[in-house]
Amino acid sequence: MSSNLPSVTIVRRIKAPPSRVYAALTKPEQMIQWWGPDAGPTLRAEADVRPGGRFNIVFRLLDGSEHNPTGVYREVVPDTKLVFTWEWAGSTGWESLVTFLLKPIDGGTELTLIHERLPDEDARKGHEAGWLGFFDKLSHFLGGAA
C-alpha cells in the first residue's frame, strides 16, 4: 500500500498509569465495559494479545447500528506499545494499521493513537470521529483526563 494514504493521530493524557491503560486496551473483561465511539454498549470483546493473535469486537452505536472491527496483533510491548491491523468484519477491500503508544507522565499516561493506511478522506474523517469518542469513553472508564 502507498504510504501517502490518509491517517489519524490523536494524543490524549489519561489519569491512570500505563499498566491500567494497557489493561483497558487488551483485557476483554475491561474492553467490554467501555469500547466504542459513543454511549452504546459493547456486545462482545475477544483479544488474544500476542504477535499473530486476533481481536474481535462488536459494539452497538446509539443509532442501533452494530459494528465489528477485527484484526491481528503485530507488535505487543506490555504497558508501552500495541500495534494491530484493523478491518471491518464482512468488508472486502482494505486493512489499515493501528498503533497505540503509552508513555508515563506526571499524573498518568500520554496515550498516542496512530491509525494509518486508511483508504480515503471520508474513512479518515469517520475514524477520527470514532477514535475521539473512543478516547472519551476510555478516559471516563479510567478516571478522567490528566
Image (cartoon, rainbow, N blue to C red):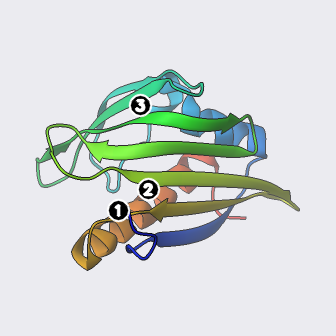
Q: Residues within 10 Å of mark 3 (few under 14, many from 20)?
A: some
Q: Please report contact status of discs 1 and 3: CB closer than 8 Å, yes or no.
A: no
Query: At 63% from the left edge and 67% from the top edge, which residue is drawn?
Result: 12
Q: Nearer the viewer, residue 141 or 82?
A: 82
Q: Residue furthest front?
A: 1
Residue 39 x/y as whole percent: 32, 52
Describe the element under mark 1 as helix, strand or loop: helix
Report the amino acid beneath label 1: Gly
Describe the element under mark 2 as helix, strand or loop: helix
Residue 104 x/y as whole percent: 84, 54
Query: At 61% from the left edge and 52% from the top edge, which residue is drawn?
Result: 100
Report the amino acid beneath label 3: Ile
Residue 145 x/y as whole percent: 65, 64
| Residue that carries the numbered disc 2 in the rendered image | 134
How far apart are the alpha carbons under marks 1 and 3? Answer: 16 Å
Q: Could you tell whether 131 is left or right of 51 in the image?
A: left
Instruction: Residue 54: give its label.
Output: none
| Residue that carries the numbered disc 1 in the rendered image | 130
Q: Please report contact status of discs 3 and 2: CB closer than 8 Å, yes or no.
A: no
Determine the image quadrant of residue 130.
Answer: bottom left
| Residue that carries the numbered disc 3 in the rendered image | 32
Asked if 47 appears above or below 105 in the picture, the reply is above
Determine the image quadrant of residue 56.
Answer: top left
